[in-house]
Amino acid sequence: MFTSLRGKFIFIFILITVSTVMISSGYARYQHRRFVMDRLKERAIVDLELISADIRSLQQWIQRDLLVLRDLPDLQALLNSQNVADESYLFHIVERQFLNIAAHHQIFQQLRLLSVSGKEIIRANSNGSKLWLTPERELQDKSDRYYFQEASLLRDGEISISPMDLNIEQGQLQIPLTPVIRYSTPLFDHQKRKKGILVLNVFGSVFLNLLDRQQKQVRGGENYYLLNKDGYFLYHPDIQKRFGFMLGHNETVVKDEPLIAAWLGTKERGTQLKDSAVTGKKTLYAYIRIPLTYPIQPDFPENSGDNRSNSYWILLTTVDDANLLLGLNEYVQSFLKFTLLLTALCVVVAVFVSWRFSRPILSLARAASKIHQGDLSSRARIYSQDDMGKFGNLFNKMAENLEKSMGNLQRSEAKYRLLFENSQDCIFVTDKEFRIVELNQAGRNLFALGENKLPRDLFLFDLGVAEKQGEQADVIRQLAAGEAIRDVEIAIVRRDGSQRYCIMTATARKGEHGIPSGLEGVLRDVTELREQQRKEQQIDRRIREEIVFAQERERRHMGQVLHEEMAQNLALVNLRLQEAEQQSCRRHNGPEEVPSCIHDELLETRNMVQVMIDQIRTMIFDLFPRVLDDQGLGAAMAWYGRNFSRKTGVNVSVYGGESELGLSKSQNIFLFRAYKELLHNAWKHAETAEIVATIKRRDEIVRMTVDDEGRGFDPQQTDMMTDEFQGIGLVTIRQWLDSMDGRMTIESEMGKGCRVILDVPIKKKENGSDECFSG
């Protein structure tokens, strides 16, 4: 079935339709389950809100009773009485009123009047069936109880509500266990002096019975709980788990359901669906938080914030999965029959649609298969004029065009083969390892193959040599990465071992998935051209050296002429002037008798001659630096730097050059001339106050650097600045370095000074080059 196109279509259509039905059914079930869960959450919250409303209503009713009791006329008269006899009378009246209220409201376990110090004054008791007053000798001191201490801090009209706990008498739990809640409010006389505390002990069972009645009305698996703020059970269907904080068994919600403990009480209300740690079933949890204080008197809106505490109850309900999914399974079973019927109908429709849809495609496939086998005249059968019919017509037109194109391609291939074989340049094709797999006749001649068959070890590059020596490495990396190159010079090794230089243009051949599978390109032999260019470069380099040598010979000749003729003649003139001065002194019997005009003229002339001698000596050094021959380049740079500092005021520091640099005399002279030119350029153009020069040797390279801290410039503009420089200039320095295989580097930025670096390779001294500087 899966080997044919029609079988695949049937399978796909069935898969799509059945999947759609199943997904739709599953989604419908999911939505129904979600709807049921939402309704259950809403119902749980509503049930809790009804119970909470009853609890809050009961709380408010008790608070109102407390305030009504506080405002009893007889109690107020007792608080404000100044007469002992009246106090005794009023005291008994208040006691009877406490008993009457306890009889009328059977929810009160105790009604107590406490003094300011915490001592019980009046205490009416009730156990639901019996009422009595506590004798004076049995009245207790409650000053250490938390509810008294909290009530003592209240202002007039404020109420304190204690947490629900078990009643304690004489320091012991009351038996039978009696849950109580204490409502307290302070009592004041007319002068607003605190006179005591009024306390109502309310049976906790009043609140717990509300939950007990609700628990009896629900199905199994649904439970209600009342928790204090610490998570202890105040109400639990299991009585043994209640009031664990006083009974010592520590039964809390954290112990029973640790996963929901942190979630409870974070908001006013909430719902959550989790696995129960007790039953292991999926369980719905819902809760409402009930605060224990409420402002009930409109006369004290500002004080209501003071009587609030952080005490609260948590009303919690749980519903397990048996109740959650009640009725859902019946819905699923009824829906399953409809799903199966719909699935069968979809299968039948899928088979029919697949047959109709696959028929034109199979026709196209048969025609394509014949074309693949070489029958370009095969055409597809058209079954309809819809989109598939249009596609069939397009396929037939494409097959017709393909038949014509293949004929044109065969003719073009014949022309290409003719061009390939008759080209004057080498045309090659390689595999991904640069092994040549196809070569035209010009290529055979280039590699000295003759008419022999292409050898298996003929490579475009000698990869081992290229990678070891770093030759042509960039070209190889580009080609291996599938990049095209154009007009790149490479060296190839012929079969006879000779080497030829070629200009290569090549591009990558792409295989499956666009991965490079080799190269195809053209090689043009430029060996003779490169040899001619090399000879011309050597001649040009020799001419440049000869020019420098000729200039230096002329400088030496001029220096010798100035030294041997001009300097000596001026020295002789100076001696003759000195002799004339001495003769004049003898004729006039001493220098004091010589006329001042003659003496001054002779002295001024001698000074002028001496200045001329000094100038000539400076010119001689500039033309022919003798210290360069005697002490070396470093000493000459330091000597000239000191003279330059005296003349210009620019501080020049020279470092290095103490050891032998290994330079030829011509290189020494040029670097010295370049150093002088760079000093003058920095002084004239950089406006610097300090120049630092270094000269040192690194392996077979001598490096000279000249740094200034002047205004700097753009190094890219040095060619346009040629006219600004004197002497040999930066351009001339660069040209001379090119002829010596050296290099000049300029590092500069506007406002950050300039550094000029001259690198000169050490070359063997040539007798013909340096002989012109000897003697």
Image (spheres, helix red, strand yellow):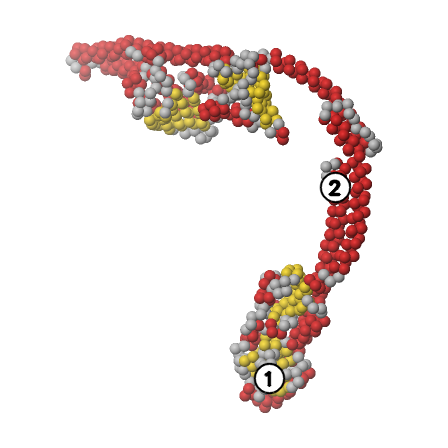
Q: Residues within 10 Å of mark 1 (few under 14, many from 20)?
A: many
Which image quadrant is residue 635 in? top left
* Residue 278 in view in this figure: yes
Residue found farthest to the right: 384
Q: Residues within 10 Å of mark 2 (few under 14, many from 20)?
A: some
The quarter of the rendered structure image containing the N terminus is top right
Residue at 79 percent of width and 46 percent of height: 346
Q: Residue 515 location in percent, x, y?
A: 60, 29
* Residue 470 in view in this figure: no
Q: Secondary structure at mark 1?
A: strand
Residue found farthest to the bottom: 85
In the rendered structure, find residue 12 and report the number of the disc placed on it. Answer: 2
Which image quadrant is residue 468 in? top left
Q: Amino acid at mark 2?
A: Ile
Q: Residue 333 location in percent, x, y?
A: 76, 57
Of residues 431 and 520, the one nearer the viewer is 431
Q: Amino acid at mark 1?
A: Arg
Q: Residue 499 location in percent, x, y?
A: 48, 16
Of residues 130 and 31, the one nearer the viewer is 31
Residue at 39 percent of width and 21 percent of height: 760
Q: Is residue 483 above or below residue 132?
A: above
Q: Secondary structure at mark 2?
A: helix
In the rendered structure, find residue 123 and report the number of the disc placed on it. Answer: 1
